[in-house]
Image (cartoon, rainbow, N blue to C red):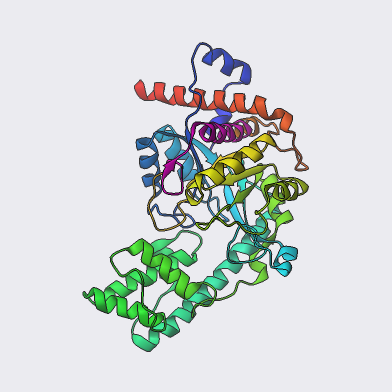
Amino acid sequence: MKNFLSEFPSFVELNKEMKGISFPEYREANGHIHTPYSFSAFTAINTAFKMAVEEKIAVLGINDFYVTDGYNAFHEGCLINKIFPLFNIEFIGLLKEEQNKGIRVNDPNNPGRIYFSGKGLDYPFRVGWIQRWQLRTVKKESQVQIKAMISKLNKLIEHQKPALKLSYDTIKKEYAHELVRERHIAKALRELAVTISPSGEEQLQFIENLYGGKKSKIGMSNPAALENEIRSNLLKSGGAAFVEEDENSFLELKKIIKIIIKAGGIPCYPVLLDDPSGRCTEFESDPEKLYNSLKSLGIECIELIPCRNDSVILKNFVEFFHKKGFIITFGTEHNTPEMLALTVTTRGSKPLDESLKRIAWEGACVIAAHQYLRADGRQGYVLPDGTHSIKQMKDLINLGQLVIEYFINKYQNEAGN
C-alpha cells in the first residue's frame, strides 16, 4: 500500500492551494481506538468509520496492541470515508525498579507495568530486523500465556460439562486476527455458556460454577458487562484460570521507545489519571514529578482517555502539561466490549470544554504534520536519537492543520465530482 500523504503537494504548494480558505478553530479528533486486529468493541472496522462519519470525527487514530496488521484496512477506510488517519501502536512494558518498589504506573492493579504508545508511525510500517525480532518474541510469549489460560479454563469446564471445551485456534478464527487476548477468551466463554441451554438461569449457573460458586452481579442480559466480569473473576490475578505473564512477555521501556522511533513514531505516555474515587497511581499522583520522570526518559507526548476521568481533574492536569509544551492527544480506546460514542467526553459523558478541544486538536495536528513530513522523506518531530524541540510546536500545529484541511477539501471535492 502507498501512503496517501506521499502524493501531497509541498508546503509551498499547500499554502497556495489553501489560500483564502478559512479553517475552523478546531475539529473533532479521536487519536486512540483499538480495532478487531487486537480487541475492540467494533466487531468490524467499518463500524468505526460509520460512527466517525455520523459524529463528524475529522481525525481518527488506530492504536492496536503490538500489531500494525490493521493499517491497510484503516488507511483505505479512512480515505473512503474522508477521515484523516493517524497510525499508532500500543505496547505493555515493565519498569522493574517501580515493580520492586510496588509503584503502580498506568496499570492500576500491577506495579511496574506500563502501557506505552507510539504516535504517527510510518505507513507502510517498517522497522529494523532487531525490532521485528523483539516484536515477534513479545507476541509469541503473550500467546503462550493465553494458551495456558485456555487450558486452565478447560479443566474447570470439564468438571461441569466434559463434552465442552474452548479451543485457541477456534477463538482466534472466530473472534481475533493475529493475537488472541483475555477479552477474546471471555467472549468465547460467554458464548459457550449460551450453547448449554435455552434457559438463561442454566447458562448463568454454568458461569457461576466456574466462579467457584460466587454469584454473578451482572447476569446474562448484559453481554458486555458479563464479559468484563468473567475476565475479572477468572482471568485476572486471583482467578482460577489466571496465568502470570512471563517477564519475556514484556519489553523494557527503552526498547519500546527504540522500536517506536525506528518505526518513525513519537513516543507517547498514556495517562491513567484519576479513578472514580479521585485517586491516581503512585507514578501519576504528582504532575510535577510525572513531568520530570517523563522528561528524563525523553518523552514529551501524553495521551488520555477522558471518559475515565473527572472533568475538573482532567482540565487541571492537561493545562499543566500544555503549559510545559507537551503534545497532548485524547481518545476513547474502545478496548472493552462496551460500544461507546467516538466523540471524546469526560466521565459521565460530559462534553469537553472549548479549551480542551483546542488542546486535543493541536495534538492531532502535530501528529498529522509529523506523518506528512515523514512521508516526504523528512525527519518530522522526532530526531533519529529520539530528541526533539518544543520550539517546533507552533509551526507543526499550523502545518498539521493545513495538511488536514487540504485532505478534507481534496476528498470532499473528489466525492462531489
Q: Position of residue 330 (x, y in %)?
A: 53, 42
In the figure, is residue 104 to the left or right of 38?
A: right
- In percent of the image, x 50 and y 37: which residue is there? 85
Residues shaded magenta: 343-370
Outermost residue, top direction?
A: 20
Front one among 138 and 335: 335
Q: Where residue 38 sits: x, y (%)?
A: 49, 57
Placement of 137 over or under 296, stated as above or below: below
Q: Nearer the viewer, residue 9 or 363?
A: 363
Q: 276 or 111, which is in the foreground?
A: 276
Residue at x-position 73% and y-position 69%: 100
Q: Nearer the viewer, residue 305 or 411?
A: 305
How many numbered markers are drawn?
Answer: 0
Q: Quadrant for residue 138, please give it.
A: bottom right
**Relative height, residue 372 to residue 46 (above, below):** above
Q: Residue at x 41, y 64 (%)?
A: 173
- Is 15 displayed left or right of 102 in the figure? left
**Is 354 covered by the magenta stretch?**
yes
Image quarter in which the C terminus is found? top left
> Whole-percent x and y of residue 217?
36, 71
Which picture quadrant has residue 414? top left
Q: Position of residue 269 (x, y in %)?
A: 64, 49
| Residue 4 is inside the magenta segment | no
